[in-house]
Image (cartoon, rainbow, N blue to C red):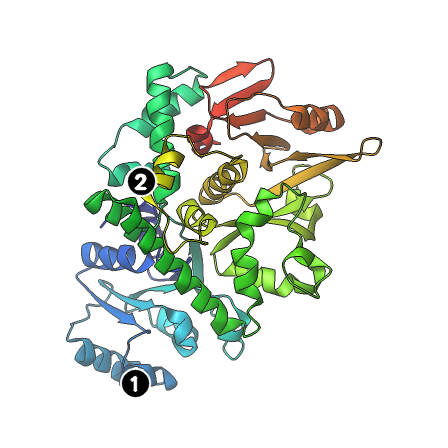
Amino acid sequence: MFKRKIYSKLLNWKKESNGKTALLVEGARRIGKSTVVEEFGKNEYQSYIFIDFSVASKSVIELFDDMSDLNYFFLQLQLQYKTDLHERNSLIVFDEVQLCPKARQAIKTLVKDHRYDYIETGSLISIKKNVKDILIPSEERKISMYPMDYEEFLWALGDETTTELIRQCFENLKPVGDAAHRKLLRDFRLYMLVGGMPQAVNEYIETNNFRKVDEIKRDILNLYKDDFAKIDSTGKLSVLFDAIPAQLNKNASRYQVSGVLAGESRASSILELIAEMKDSKTVNISYHANDPNAGLSSNLDLSKFKMFICDTGLFVTDMFKDKDFTENVIYEKLLNDKLSGNLGYLYENIIAQTLVANGNELFYHTILNNETRHNYEIDFLLSRKNKICPIEVKSSSYKAHKSLDVFTKKFSDRILDRYLIYTKDICKESDLICIPVYMAQFL
C-alpha cells in the first residue's frame, strides 16, 4: 500500500472520538479509500470486519433490516466473516456504503452501543437518490479523500526528502537553482501525466510504460461515466464531464453550458446536475466570487463556474480521448514540454487539484473593462486571515500579470499576498511572489 496522508487523520479520529462517532470517508472511485481503511483496520485494531457492499451476500445485507437485537447482529457478522470481534478493539468497515443505505442509517444505533468502531467509505455518497429514504446519522463525522497529491506521489517513487527541501525554499523565498529547478519541473510534469490514482501510479512504477498507464486511466474514466449513467439517465452528466478540457481550452470566463448541452441556454437550469457532479468528487468546481473578500463563499454565483477534473492524470487522458490510446510520444512531449499549443488549462487543472487537496474551496473572479470589453481574470482566490490572496496561473516562464495588476488596483485594501504560478524558479518582485508550479502545494 502507498503511504497516504489520510492515515494520520484516521489515527486522530480513533484517538479523539473513542467510539463516539463513526467516520465517513468520502471520495471519488479508485482513489484508494478502501485500501487505506482496510490497512488501518489491520494495523490499529485487534481485529476488523470489512463489509464490501458491492459484493456482500444477501444474508449480510438483510441483517440491516432489523437492528433491534445487536447481540444477534454481531454474532451473525462474526459467523459470516469468520472473525472474532473484541469490545473497544475491533473495527467494522462499511465499504461502498451508498449501496446499502440501511447500513448507513444503522450507524446511530451502532455508535450508541459503543462496542466497536465504525468507518464507512463511499462514492457519490451524498446523491439524494441514495439517502432520500433514510435518516442520516448525526453520529457520523465526514472527511474527504482525494487522489494522491504530489508529495504522496514522490513517496511512492521512494523520494522522502524533496518536499521538505522545496518547502524551505518556499518559506524563505530562496531559489532552488537552475539545475535543481529543471529536474523538479520535469518530475512535477511526470506527476501531472501519471496523476494520483493509485492504480495508475502503481502501473507506472511497475512498467514505466505510459501506454499501460493510459489504459488504467481510461478504465477509470469509463467507470465514472458508468456511475454518471446510473444517477442520470439523460446522459447529461457524461457530456458535461467530457467537455471539461474543451471548455477550459476556450479560456472563457465560465463553463458555457449552452455550448455543451443542446437546449440548455442557462447554467441555472442544470444546477442540480452540477451539484451532483461536485458531490461525486470526480470534478472540482470553482465558483465566481462576485465581491471578493475574506468571506468568499458568501458572495459566490452558483450559475457562473468553472469545472476541473479531480485528477490531472485523468485530465490528460481525457484531452486525447479522440484516440483509442494516448501514444507514448505524446506523453514524452508533454513530459519534456515539447508539445505544441497552449497548455495553460492543463496547469489550471493541476493547481485546482492541489488547492482542493489542501482543504480549499475554489473561487475565481473576473473584471470587465467596459471600454475594451476585455475580461481580466484571477484564476483562483484564497481566503487567508481576514484578507484574500489572488493567484494567476501561467503555463510558461512568462511573467506578465495584467489581471493581477487590474485586480490589485481595484481591491488593494483586501489583499494579503499576490501569487503568480509559472514554470520558473521562485522569486519576489515588489509585492508579487512568483512561484514554480511544484510549490503550489504550500499555499
Q: Nearer the viewer, residue 144 or 154?
A: 154
- In the rendered structure, find residue 153 and report the number of the disc placed on it: 2
User: Quick one: label 1 or label 2, which is nearer the N terminus?
Assistant: 1
Q: Residues within 10 Å of mark 2 (few under 14, many from 20)?
A: many
Q: Nearer the viewer, residue 342 or 424?
A: 342
**Residue 374, image x, y percentages:** 75, 34
C-beta proximity under 8 Å, tags 1 and 2: no
Left or right: 381, with 83 as reference point: right
Q: Nearer the viewer, residue 101 or 72?
A: 101
Q: Which residue is mark 1?
A: 58
**Residue 57, image x, y percentages:** 27, 82
**Residue 314, image x, y percentages:** 41, 50
Q: Residue at x 57, y 73 (%)?
A: 234
**Inter-mark Cα distance, 1 to 2:** 39 Å
**Residue 339, image x, y percentages:** 44, 34
In the rendered view, tell whether residue 385 sits above or below residue 97: above
Q: Residue at x 22, y 62 (%)?
A: 89
In the rendered view, tell whether residue 56 sits above or below residue 415: below
Q: Nearer the viewer, residue 61 or 206?
A: 206
Amino acid carrying mark 2 in the image: Phe
Using the rendered image of the protein, determine whether residue 186 is visible from the camera's viewpoint. Answer: yes
Frontmost of labels 1 and 2 is 2
In the rendered view, tell whether residue 154 sits above or below residue 207: above
Q: Residue at x 45, y 68 (%)?
A: 227
Amino acid carrying mark 1 in the image: Lys
In the rendered view, tell whether residue 85 sits above or below residue 322: below
Q: Residue at x 19, y 68 (%)?
A: 86
Left or right: 76, with 177 as reference point: left
Left or right: 143, with 89 as reference point: right
> Splitting the image into 4 quarters, where does residue 43 fall?
bottom left
Using the rendered image of the protein, determine whether residue 2 is visible from the camera's viewpoint. Answer: no
